[in-house]
Image (tube, rainbow, N blue to C red):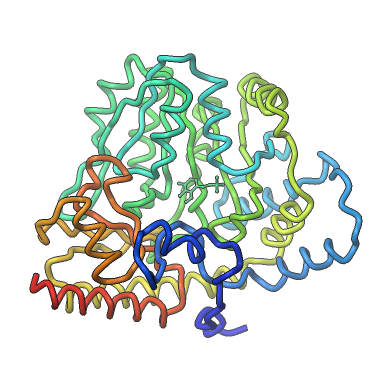
């Protein structure tokens, strides 16, 4: 396997992919090149494919043992990659992180309770709170010339009567990998106010530049008792369609409550392919991941260089983590709808409209660069042509 492995273009049309097969329908335009929803266009690592094929070849797909969920492999992975060694007994399977968010909301808060999120942020953070009839309290990130940071003073004020914080680390869409100092300040406020934290760390293996992911729970034991960590191999190894994730809770009572909810809902189950993939990814996927990170770093450099040079009114900062770039298009002077229409109808490129990440995202677009360099180049050329045509 070489880094060029990621250059291989795989035709995803007619594979039932929401990103590719639904793009024209969702963006309301024909021939849209999709760089939106957060999965990548890359083939999963060979050991993951082999594990799934082996499991399929077995041919009997009865109920999997709850004692075989790939937790040991995850434990080894977290120790190796993030210097954190949670006990296997702290791990609970969930069919996806968004599901886990809802379970946590239902378990640890009551209808009407206040839940803090930090927009612009992943849209299901909003919808999970709203759909469960809880109240969203926004602690917006501060944007200083494309550098985002947490507004701790505002958080301290709002934490007083809130029950839960849903935290995104690394942050989708702004691409921050929060530093130890930032995490400490955040958790100090949460401890003082008895706030529980759901720490969504689904992007934790996608770290760029010199940054390092720090699992929030690894900071201290006292703190860990207040934290519900969500992890999954899905962003990293491109297995989102297998819906397999793990929630890690060190506190026995908090874990019992969460597990009870998962059982009440009847979702304490994983599918056999998800388990096989998760185990193989965590046991054998590291060399592939190292290659992926080199490739993504290259894509991020290419993207930021192109935008700075050829699309001067669009501002971009190289993300510290994730394969998502946050384009500040406010200088184009378009409303959120006009901006969406410009990218879909004029450029024929499918990006996520920043407005869906909260009102702080209006005037921004999110671009997923988890694709071959060729697709990325094509998308950027399309945007450049449309940009020229509009004489921005
Ligand atoms: C921060 C974050 N959490 C959760 C998810 C989705 O998780 P799942 O597919 O496991 O529900 C995403 C997907 O983009 C994400 O960016």
Q: Tell me if I can see residue 320 in this picture.
A: no
Q: How many numbered badges does the structure rendering display?
A: 0
The image position of residue 8, as x and y in percent, is 54, 83
The image position of residue 96, as x and y in percent, is 60, 44
Residue at left 65%, top 70%?
Answer: 45
Q: Nearer the viewer, residue 194 or 114?
A: 114
Left or right: residue 284 versus residue 345 is right
Q: Nearer the viewer, residue 323 or 376?
A: 376
Left or right: residue 120 versus residue 338 is right
Q: Quadrant of residue 248?
A: top right
Residue at left 82%, top 45%?
Answer: 68
Left or right: residue 119 versus residue 201 is left
- Eyeballing the image, is 34 above or below 70? below
The image position of residue 361, as x and y in percent, is 25, 47
State the quadrant of the C terminus. Answer: bottom left
Q: Tell me if I can see residue 138 in this picture.
A: yes
Residue at left 41%, top 78%?
Answer: 375
Q: Nearer the viewer, residue 225 or 116?
A: 116
- Eyeballing the image, is 131 above or below 316? above
The image position of residue 58, as x and y in percent, is 90, 62
State the quadrant of the N terminus. Answer: bottom right
Q: Nearer the viewer, residue 265 or 117?
A: 265
Q: Quadrant of residue 321?
A: bottom left
- Eyeballing the image, is 78 above or below 23? above
């Amino acid at each position: 396997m070489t880094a060029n492995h990621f250059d291989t273009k795989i035709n995803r049309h007619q594979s039932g992919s929401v990103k590719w097969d639904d793009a024209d329908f969702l963006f309301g335009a024909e021939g849209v090149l999709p760089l939106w929803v957060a999965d990548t266009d890359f083939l999963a690592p060979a050991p993951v494919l082999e594990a799934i094929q082996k499991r399929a070849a077995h041919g009997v797909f009865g109920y999997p043992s709850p004692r075989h969920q790939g937790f040991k492999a995850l434990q080894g992975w977290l120790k190796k990659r993030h210097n954190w060694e949670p006990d296997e007994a702290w791990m609970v399977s969930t069919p996806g992180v968004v599901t886990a968010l809802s379970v946590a909301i239902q378990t640890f808060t009551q209808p009407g309770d206040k839940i803090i999120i930090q927009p612009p942020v992943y849209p299901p953070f909003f919808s999970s709170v709203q759909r469960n009839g809880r109240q969203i309290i926004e602690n917006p990130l501060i944007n200083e010339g494309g550098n985002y940071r947490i507004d701790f003073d505002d958080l301290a004020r709002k934490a007083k009567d809130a029950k839960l914080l849903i935290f995104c680390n690394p942050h989708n869409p702004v691409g921050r990998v929060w530093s130890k100092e930032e995490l400490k300040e955040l958790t100090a406020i949460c401890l003082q106010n008895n706030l529980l934290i759901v720490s969504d760390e689904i992007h934790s293996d996608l770290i760029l530049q010199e940054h390092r992911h720090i699992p929030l729970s690894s900071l201290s034991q006292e703190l860990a008792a207040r934290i519900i960590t969500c992890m999954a191999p899905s962003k990293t190894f491109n297995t989102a369609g297998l819906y397999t994730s793990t929630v890690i809770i060190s506190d026995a009572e908090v874990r019992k409550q969460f597990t009870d909810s998962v059982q009440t809902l009847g979702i304490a189950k994983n599918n056999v392919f998800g388990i096989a993939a998760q185990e193989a990814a965590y046991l054998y996927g590291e060399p592939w991941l190292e290659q992926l990170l080199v490739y993504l770093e290259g894509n991020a450099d290419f993207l930021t260089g192109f935008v700075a040079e050829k699309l001067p009114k669009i501002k971009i900062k190289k993300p510290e983590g994730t394969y998502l770039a946050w384009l500040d298009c406010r200088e184009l002077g378009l409303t959120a709808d006009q901006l969406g229409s410009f990218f879909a109808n004029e450029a024929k490129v499918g990006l996520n409209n920043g407005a869906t990440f909260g009102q702080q995202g209006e005037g921004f677009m999110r671009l997923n660069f988890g694709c071959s360099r060729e697709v990325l180049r094509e998308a950027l050329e399309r945007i450049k042509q449309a940009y020229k045509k509009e004489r921005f």
